[in-house]
Image (spheres, rainbow, N blue to C red):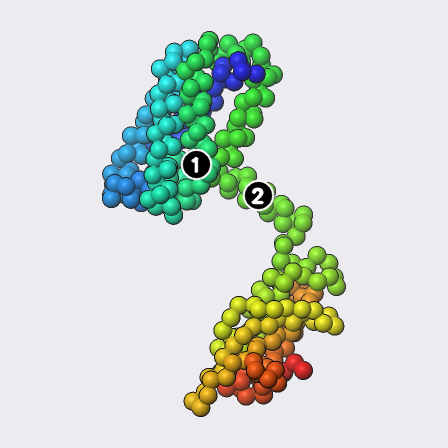
């Protein structure tokens, strides 16, 4: 296995560096993505960042060509290892300087620097070392062990694709959509008459007319919830302000515990205001005091 890894490391590394180098050097995305990269923050210039990305892309293509043409020579592998070490240093500094910026590693991704970027750079470093100490050519390894080589190359391709954030749209997003089709949305009900998660009820509530009417009074996130006779009760704290007084209240919503976003029709939501000190119901004037809102029936 070790001989297979070192024998095919130049081929795998050449494929990775050839792809990222070509995208940086020839891709139109380099100019578009450069301002979003940590490199632009380091150089205080998007134009200089584009030039550096183009230069790195050219270096990657040169190293990839050397790995393919003269794999037994340690120079291309050593150069790839140096690139990997440089990438790791750049990612570490970029993560500390501008954690919200992208790395520009393939000039196509605009996601922040994550562990996947570090893992891919480490892969370049380790593969470069393996290519530098490899004996013989990658084509002799492929011709001598074709089945094992095919399996190794397929596994390496899967790993590199998984470590490339800009390829997520080709495999990760379809996989997530398939999971939702099979297992359903986590905030949807799983069947007729079954209770949905509390987060689904809160999401449904916040899109309702009851929430629009009562939101000027609400001052907190969800404080408590419970189920009673098929209703899900959601409790918030609130403050009712008038020219004469400021009254702390509890805002209590009640809605069907089985309703979710995929339930047809508008949800039935009831709302009540309770005095925070006495627990006594407060009248409907709280809702009617909200301008341009339709008063809703009170629970209880």
Q: CB atoms at circles 2 and 1 under 8 Å apart? A: no
Q: How many numbered badges does the structure rendering display?
A: 2
Q: Quadrant of the N terminus?
A: top right
Residue under label 2: 174
In front here: 58 or 227?
A: 227
Q: Which of marks 2 and 1 is in front?
A: 1
Residue depicted at x 40% and y 35%: 106
Depicted 123 relative to depicted 77: above or below: below
State the residue at coordinates (51%, 33%).
161
| Residue at x 49%, y 31% (from the top left corner) | 160
Location of residue 211 in the rendering, given as x and y in whole percent from the top left corner: 55, 74
Residue at the extreme bottom of the image, as rendered: 244
Where does residue 297 sit, x and y in percent of width and height? 63, 83
Disc on res. 117: 1
Residue 290, visible in the rendered structure: no
Quadrant where the image shows the C terminus: bottom right
User: Residue, x 43% and y 35% (percent of image)?
Assistant: 118
Residue 241 in the image: above or below residue 47: below
Q: Is residue 52 above or below residue 3?
A: below
Q: Where is residue 229 in the image (x, y as percent from the top left)?
A: 74, 72
Secondary structure at numbered mark 2: helix
């Amino acid at each position: 296995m070790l001989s297979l890894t070192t024998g095919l490391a130049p081929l795998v590394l050449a494929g990775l560096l050839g792809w990222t180098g070509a995208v940086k050097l020839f891709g139109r995305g380099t100019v578009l993505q450069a301002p979003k990269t940590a490199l632009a923050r380091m150089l205080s210039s998007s134009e200089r960042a584009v030039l550096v990305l183009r230069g790195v892309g050219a270096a990657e293509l040169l190293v990839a060509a050397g790995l393919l043409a003269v794999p037994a020579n340690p120079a291309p592998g050593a150069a790839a290892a140096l690139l990997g070490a440089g990438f790791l240093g750049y990612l570490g500094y970029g993560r500390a300087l501008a954690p919200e910026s992208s790395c520009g590693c393939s000039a196509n991704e605009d996601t922040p620097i994550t562990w996947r970027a570090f893992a891919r750079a480490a892969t370049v470093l380790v593969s470069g070392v393996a290519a530098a100490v490899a004996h013989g050519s990658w084509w002799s390894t492929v011709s001598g062990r074709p089945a094992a080589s095919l399996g190794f190359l397929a596994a390496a391709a899967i790993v590199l694709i998984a470590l490339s954030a800009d390829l997520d749209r080709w495999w990760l997003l379809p996989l997530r959509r398939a999971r939702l089709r099979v297992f359903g949305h986590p905030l949807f009900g799983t069947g007729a008459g079954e209770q949905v998660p509390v987060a689904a009820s809160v999401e449904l509530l916040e899109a309702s007319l009851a929430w629009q009417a009562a939101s000027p009074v609400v001052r907190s996130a969800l404080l408590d919830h419970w189920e009673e006779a098929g209703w899900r009760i959601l409790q918030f704290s609130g403050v009712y302000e008038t020219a004469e007084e400021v009254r702390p209240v509890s805002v209590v919503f009640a809605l069907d515990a089985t309703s979710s976003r995929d339930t047809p029709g508008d949800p039935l939501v009831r709302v009540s205001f309770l005095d925070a000190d006495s627990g006594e119901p407060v009248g409907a004037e709280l809702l009617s005091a909200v301008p341009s809102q339709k008063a809703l029936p009170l629970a209880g």
